[in-house]
Amino acid sequence: MKFAILINSAPYTCQSAETAYHFVLAALNKGHQVPRIFFYMDGVHNGSAFITAPQDETQMVERWSSLAAKYDIDLVLCIAAAQRRGLVDAGEAARHSKSGSNLAAGFRLSGLGQLMEMSIESDRLMVFGESP
Amino acid sequence: MTTTNKRLLCLNRHAPHGTIHGQESLDLVLIASAFNQEISLAFMDDGVFQLVKDWQTEIAGLKNYSKTFRALEMHDVEKIYVHQPSLQARGLSCDDLLIEVELLNDDELSQLIEQQDQVFPF
C-alpha cells in the first residue's frame, strides 16, 4: 500500500511527530511504500537544522534526515507555512535577505501542490498532529 | 497535472482566530480546487465561528481572511457544510453566516466523512 504522510505538529512539543516516525518505520518494514512525507502547519519545525535538543533526548530532526536517506523519502515542507515560522533554505535566505538558512539535510521547500499530488497518488492518507 | 479524482474533506474545528488552523485549511482548499479534486469543507465545534459575518480582525492585528470564504464559489468549491448542533450550541443560526451552507445533523456529518477518500482535520 502507498501511504501519504502529513505531519502538522512540531517535534518535542507534541507526541505526533514521534508517533508519525514510528508509523512510517513500521509501514516500511511491512513492505509498504512511503514516497513522501509532507510537513504543514507547525510540522515544518521538523525540518529545522537549528533545533538543538539535549544530548540525552531523541535527535528527531537528524532522525528524519537519516530515514529519508535510507529509504529515499521525499521530505517536503510547505513553503508558506515554513516562511511564517522562520524555516528557510539557502535560496530563500538570499531572496529575502535573511542572515542564515536552517533547512536540515534531506528536506526541501515546496508548495501545497506537493501535498495534493501525494494525496492523490496514495492509497491512504495518514495525518499526524491536528493540534487541539 | 494528475487527473485522478479523490473526494477530500477539510474538517474545521477551530475558531477563526487564536490559532492559524482556519487560514491554513483554506490555503489547502484552494490548492485542492486548483488540482480539480472533489473538495468539501465542513465546520463543527468552534469551527462554526469561522463563518460568522462581520469579522473585525484589525482590532486584534490579524489578517481578515473571511473574504476567501466568499470567493470559494469562484473556485468551484461549493460543498460547504455546517454541523447544525455545533451552530445551535453557540447561539448561532444560518442568518449569522457570511455564506450559504448546508446544515448537517450528527448522522449526516458522519455519513459525509464516511463518503470521503481522505479527510484533512484542522
Image (cartoon, grey):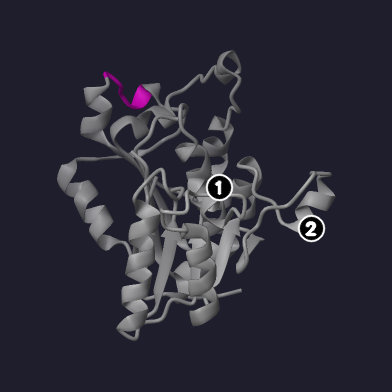
Give the alpha-carbon distance from disc 1 to disc 2, as whole Å.
23 Å
Outermost residue to the front:
A56
Q: Using residue B87 as the reference point, say whether residue B52 is left or right of it.
A: right
Outermost residue to the left:
B107
Outermost residue to the top:
B59
Q: Quadrant of the C terminus of chain A?
A: top left
Residue A116 visible in the picture: no
Q: Say what secondary structure mark 1 lies in.
A: helix
Dividing the picture into quadrants, the one containing residue A125 is: bottom left
For residue B44, above or below residue B76: above
Q: Nearer the viewer, residue A62 or A84?
A: A62
Q: Nearer the viewer, residue A3 or A85?
A: A85
Q: Disc 1 marks which residue? A: B27
Instruction: Locate residue B113, reporting x and y percent.
Output: 27, 55
Q: What is the three-letter code of the residue carrying label 2?
A: Gly
Q: Residues within 10 Å of mark 2 (few under 14, many from 20)?
A: few
Is the stretch drawn in magenta largely helix, strand or loop? loop
Q: What is the three-letter code of the residue carrying label 1?
A: Asp
Q: Is residue B106 magenta?
A: no
To which chain does the residue with label 1 belong?
B
Label placed on residue A91: 2
For residue B117, above or below residue B28: below
Magenta segment boundaries in residue numbering: B91-95
Instruction: Locate residue A68, reporting x and y percent.
Output: 52, 74
Label placed on residue A59: none
Instruction: Locate residue B12, reporting x and y percent.
Output: 37, 41
Q: Quadrant of the N terminus of chain A?
A: bottom left
Q: Residues within 10 Å of mark 1 (few under 14, many from 20)?
A: few
Q: Say what secondary structure mark 2 lies in.
A: helix
